Image (cartoon, helix red, strand yellow):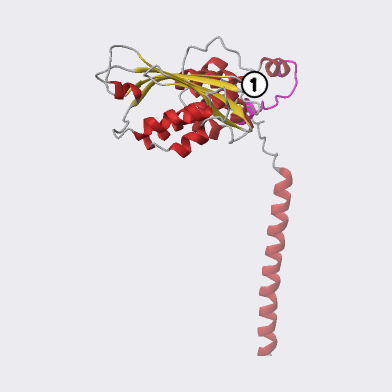
Amino acid sequence: MEIFSVLSEASFVAVAVTTLCFLFALFSLLRSYSLPRRFTPPRKHHCDCASNSDSALNGGMLEPSPVPTPAPLAERRTGSSMMEELVPEITTHALSYLDYPSLCRLSMTNSSMRKAANDDNAWKALYHKDFTLEQDSVTPTNGWKAYYAATRAIVNINTEFFNIVRDKSLPAMSRFWLNADYVKCIHASGELFSGYNAVMQSWQIVFNWEQGLNFQVRDVRARVLTDMAWVTMKTYVDMDTGPFNMTNVFEFHNGRWYMVHHHSSVMNGEVDNQIVHG
């Protein structure tokens, strides 16, 4: 009997708990259906567009206006470089500060820089800076870049002539001159030597002079044509005696320049015959 009383008491407790749980669940379900649904106001959007305001007044729904994003720098320039956007005069002025090697290296970077570095006005400005303003009215056949390169080449060859004189190298001088009967050389003494052999003999006399030839070259001016070029300059053997006026004429044969004429004369005063002859 005690066993049955214990079992009946446990069963009563279980049934009571189950009933209470069921009633609580039923009450929660009925409450959710009986309460009104909470109203959530529509989200307001900031609008600074007149068309959106008109739409709202007419009963239309407000649509959020997209926030403009800044365009990338490359898109704003539509693919062009800063150099291309500059005024041509400003570009030429900027490139005029570059020297010959720098301008050549700039032309090998990319297409935009190549276009800017190959601009004819840039090379004309560089020519005037490195050489002379005397040929401002000249219109080179192949452009100023080619004319600059040709002028630079002939100036370097003219420098080689003075190096040969300093070294007193007759073999180098014989290779420097064109072997032709019309070549001529007039030294500062005023004596004329005509023909290749006579010109070489005159330089042999100059090189046999024991005193060294230490001189400075100033005011170099060059004019280059297709197969002929001439260079004028002032040469100072002794700064106290005044300069010599010199003119060197070159002809282009078989892919290289040869000297065909040399003329030297004293500008002011009389100097020692040996110095003049040198």
Query: Mark 1 packing: few (<14 Cα in 10 Å), some, or many (20+)?
Result: few
Residue nearest the viewer, comparing 48 with 112: 112
Magenta part of the chain: 56-76
Q: Is residue 99 visible?
A: no
Q: Specify the amino acid type for callout 1.
A: Asn
> Which element type, helix, strand or loop, lies under badge 1?
loop
Left or right of residue 170: residue 48: right
Residue 275 lies in the magenta-colored region: no
Left or right of residue 232: residue 52: right
Q: Quadrant of residue 240?
A: top left
Residue 97 vs 32, above or below: the answer is above
Image quarter in which the C terminus is found:
top left
Kindly report the secondary structure that dominates the magenta region of the rendered protein: loop
Pick out the residue farthest to the left: 240
Image quarter in which the N terminus is found:
bottom right
Residue nearest the viewer, comparing 62 with 199: 199
Residue 122 vs 27, above or below: the answer is above
Percent position of residue 74, x then y: 61, 30
Residue nearest the viewer, comparing 153 with 107: 153
For the point 72% across and 44% down, which residue is it?
34
Residue 24 vs 207, above or below: the answer is below
Q: Is residue 239 visible?
A: yes
Percent position of residue 118, x then y: 60, 25
Q: How many marks?
A: 1
Left or right of residue 27: residue 220: left
Percent position of residue 237, x then y: 31, 24
Residue occupied by mark 1: 142
Residue nearest the viewer, comparing 71 with 199: 199
Percent position of residue 262, x then y: 47, 22
